[in-house]
């Protein structure tokens, strides 16, 4: 097959390649012309990366060239226009983003000022209407199982378990957290601070109001069938880990206020689960991965405590679960940011007590809800929670035959949260809303559940395409 070996380039091919590389060379030179480089992004409302100051230490540890790379890509001349064109092309192709961009809102003032005004009005209206946080009808007795006799329980020294969750109705305006002991580094909407990569998130009133409408719609439809409905918007790391001062400094929205705005406008048929306050009270613990957008199993546990407070269950102490450490975990941000800027991550799961079986369409049944991913690739270990994202997962706790059943509609944030629900329900039916479109009221009736829980990232509640996926489902 000698004729398949490399052949000399034709003159025509060389003629075409020449201008292409010439353009690339010119663009590279333009990129290094410092006077042309912008210093501030109006689109993202932040100061752009500066050219690093040289030091022998930064040269030796490799961070100097990482900083140059960040400066070059972050403040390239015309970057704002190119990003806008890219977004428009993505929209035309039907491609959505999981993260929320901080776009300029209509009217005067900032995101924060607009949210404050809307929140004040919404809470005043809620007080006048007498709206509370009472879940939808159908009283359910909490069922707490005994730990399995054969379970080998290990101590959990890091979590600081509280007897009960923090008051979910408390208004928290200022709090301590990461405040940039080392200078925060910005990579678009990704902020690296004190070894953690967090995604900035804004507030979109139009999308939020659409989400509220969907919640009320689902709550009403389920209440007619005597089924309780709970809305758990899961806070993301940026608002929990960072101090309130740093949150304001980087121009990110206060998710506690977003939740209060949502809940003030949701009706009495929606059980409003505010996990933000409880997570905030534990924000010095390992609640979110350093290099990934998800929360850890510990973060999910504190949200579970908040859910129990709303649903009328007694949370099972974390000490009654078996801790399993599956080793190094590489998250989504570890490939966008230099590894030496991030604290290392490890995948820790908590195995619930009881005789628990898990069935996933098209797969062999599993014993338990935690899959041992210790030997898997480091970037795949988040799949240890209920075996990752699947269209339908049915989990049965055979030790609780008389307990109620529930239906959980979730994104990937919901995976570790589902684990703890096995302690209160006989069956937990899990649907990924990105792969199911049958109205929830019909699904709940078909599965014969008493509770329906929506567990999705609060960042997704600010994303138009994701909310549109719920349009047909939340009926």
Image: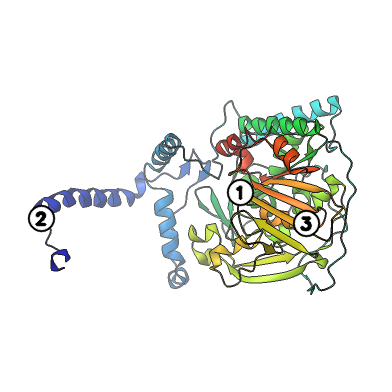
Locate residue 297, reporting x and y percent. Answer: 70, 60
Q: Which residue is mark 1?
A: 391
Drawn side of residue 292 relative to residue 352, left or right: left
For disc 2, the marked residue is: 10
Gap between marks 1 and 3 measured at Cα = 19 Å
- Secondary structure under tag 2 reads loop
Q: In the rendered image, which quarter contains the C terminus? A: top right
With 27 as the anchor, is 49 left or right in this view? right
Disc 3 marks which residue?
422
Q: Choose mark 2 or mark 3, whichever is in front.
A: 3
Quadrant assignment, res 358: bottom right
The residue located at (54%, 57%) in the rendering is 332
Q: Earlier in the sequence, mark 2 or mark 3?
A: 2
Taking the image as shown, residue 158 lies to the left or right of residue 51, namely: right
Residue 318 coordinates in the image, percent (x, y): 80, 64
Sequence-earlier tag: 1 or 3: 1
Q: Residues within 10 Å of mark 3 (few under 14, many from 20)?
A: many
Quadrant position of the N terminus in the picture: bottom left
Residue 80 lies, with reference to residue 187, above or below; the image says above
Residue shown at 69% from the left, 51% from the top: 240
Residue 9 x %, y %: 12, 58
């Amino acid at each position: 097959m000698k004729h398949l070996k490399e052949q000399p380039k034709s003159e025509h091919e060389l003629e075409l390649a020449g201008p292409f590389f010439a353009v690339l060379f010119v663009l590279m030179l333009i990129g290094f012309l410092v006077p042309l480089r912008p210093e501030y992004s109006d689109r993202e409302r932040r100061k752009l990366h500066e050219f690093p100051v040289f030091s022998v230490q930064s040269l030796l540890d490799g961070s100097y060239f990482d900083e140059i790379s960040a400066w070059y890509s972050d403040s390239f001349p015309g970057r704002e226009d190119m990003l806008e064109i890219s977004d428009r092309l993505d929209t035309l192709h039907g491609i959505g983003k999981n993260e929320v961009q901080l776009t300029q809102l209509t009217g005067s003032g900032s995101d924060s000022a607009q949210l404050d005004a809307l929140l004040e009005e919404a809470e005043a209206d809620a007080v006048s209407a007498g709206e509370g946080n009472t879940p939808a009808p159908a009283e359910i007795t909490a069922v707490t199982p005994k730990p399995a006799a054969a379970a080998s329980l290990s101590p959990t020294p890091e979590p600081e378990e509280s007897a009960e969750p923090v008051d979910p109705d408390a208004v928290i305006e200022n709090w301590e957290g990461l405040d940039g002991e080392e200078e925060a580094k910005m990579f678009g909407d990704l902020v690296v601070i004190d070894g953690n990569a967090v995604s900035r998130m804004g507030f979109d009133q139009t999308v939020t109001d659409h989400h509220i409408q969907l919640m009320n719609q689902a709550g009403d439809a389920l209440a007619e069938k005597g089924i309780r409905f709970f809305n758990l918007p899961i806070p993301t790391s940026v608002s929990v880990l960072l101090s309130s001062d740093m949150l304001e400094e980087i121009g990110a929205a206060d998710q506690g206020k977003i939740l209060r705005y949502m809940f003030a406008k949701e009706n009495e048929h929606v059980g409003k689960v505010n996990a933000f306050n409880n997570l905030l009270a534990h924000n010095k613990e390992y609640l979110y991965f350093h290099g990934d957008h998800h929360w850890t199993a510990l973060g999910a546990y504190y949200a579970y405590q908040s859910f129990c407070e709303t649903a009328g269950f007694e949370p099972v102490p974390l000490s009654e679960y078996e801790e399993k450490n599956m080793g190094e975990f590489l998250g989504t941000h570890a490939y966008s940011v230099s590894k030496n800027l991030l604290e290392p991550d490890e995948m820790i799961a908590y195995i619930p007590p009881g005789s628990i079986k898990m069935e996933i369409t098209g797969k062999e049944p599993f014993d338990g809800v935690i899959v041992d991913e210790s030997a898997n690739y480091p970037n795949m270990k988040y799949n240890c929670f209920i075996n990752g994202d699947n269209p339908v997962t049915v989990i049965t706790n055979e030790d609780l035959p008389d307990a109620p059943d529930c239906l959980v509609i979730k994104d990937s944030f919901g995976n570790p949260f589902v684990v703890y629900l096995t302690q209160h329900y006989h069956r937990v039916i899990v649907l990924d809303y990105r792969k199911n479109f049958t109205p929830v009221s019909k699904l709940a009736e078909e599965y014969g559940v008493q509770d329906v829980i929506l567990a999705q990232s609060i960042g997704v509640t600010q994303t138009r395409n994701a909310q549109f996926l719920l349009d047909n489902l939340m009926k």
